[in-house]
Amino acid sequence: MDPDDEDLWAPFLASRTPDRQAARLRAHAREDQRRGQAHLPRRAAALSRDEIVRVAIAVADAEGADAVTMRRIARELNAGTMSLYWHIASKEELLDLMIDDVQGGRPLPDPSGNWRQDMDQLARNTRQSLHQHPWMMDFLGGRPPAGPKSLRFVERALASFDGLDLPGSMAMDIVSTVGTYVMGAVLREVQEQNNEAHRDQQFAGLTEDEIQTVIAEFIERIRATGRYPKMAQLLDDNVDPDAADTRDARFEFGLACLLDGIAARLPGHAAPAQPPATPPPAPPSPAPPSPAPPSRAPAG
């Protein structure tokens, strides 16, 4: 990491002290004084922050973020746990560095002059990155993308709108909207993959004929209720909304719809045609007057 980037972490991150580098050095100085050691240990000097982060990401990719501990990463690096603390203050800081590395490391070519092509590429690269690092989905809702690599990525994305004379807020809204679509799409895709794994587990030990019999009986129960005619039609047409072989096509469809909608809102673009006005329904005919209730005799 560039030393100048130390000052580019958002101050509201829980893992960040007001002066992280100074705090880390003071902690090491106190530990050195206690040990009577006046120089950086040889193994700690052989490590780098980038190497530690790279190994931690590899562990998270293979086993999930819960597997990432300072002790585990030290073992992967054939180093003592304390050697890592010369470079990274805590597991929380390590997670921040991992997230920033993944978010900022997404490939994004230089602006092409075609904003739509650039946003299309951003969406595809982000989707690919989230599937390569599935543990990221556990953190996107709870940890802000506030590191120096993420800042550089957003800066390049915003440059895709140079020359369009867009307000900066609108360019940022477009980048955020594309990112939000991708996160939602990947969340759905992960859910589908989890469902597939659960289904395979539930059907373990059954033959393919037995599986199809179970599914057919379930479909028939849906149809027999008479309450779900549209779903019944989809089933009759062999439409599987979660099918793995249509996953890419569904992502492409949603992305195209999104970019079409953004294009329609850009300055200078013709406003989309409004649907013809539907005439208001005729007022209901007045109901015939109800017969007057029979009069009641006064109580005697």
Image (cartoon, rainbow, N blue to C red):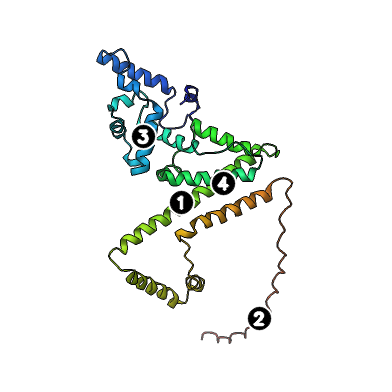
Q: Residue at x 38, y 70 (%)?
A: 215
Mark 3 or mark 2, earlier in chain: 3
Q: Residue at x 49, y 67 (%)?
A: 239
Q: Which residue is mark 3?
A: 55
Badge nearest the viewer, 4 or 2 = 4
Q: Which residue is mark 1?
A: 187
Badge nearest the viewer, 1 or 3 = 3
How much space separates mark 4 and mark 2, taking CA atoms? Answer: 53 Å
Question: Which quarter of the figure is the N terminus placed in?
Answer: top left
Question: Identity of the amino acid at label 2?
Answer: Ala
Q: Quadrant of residue 163?
A: top right
Q: Secondary structure at mark 4?
A: helix
Q: Which residue is mark 2?
A: 287
Mark 4 or mark 2, earlier in chain: 4
Question: Identity of the amino acid at label 1?
Answer: Leu
Q: Are marks 1 and 2 in contact (CB under 8 Å)?
A: no
Residue 178 — which label? 4
Mark 1 or mark 3, earlier in chain: 3
Question: Identity of the amino acid at label 3?
Answer: Val
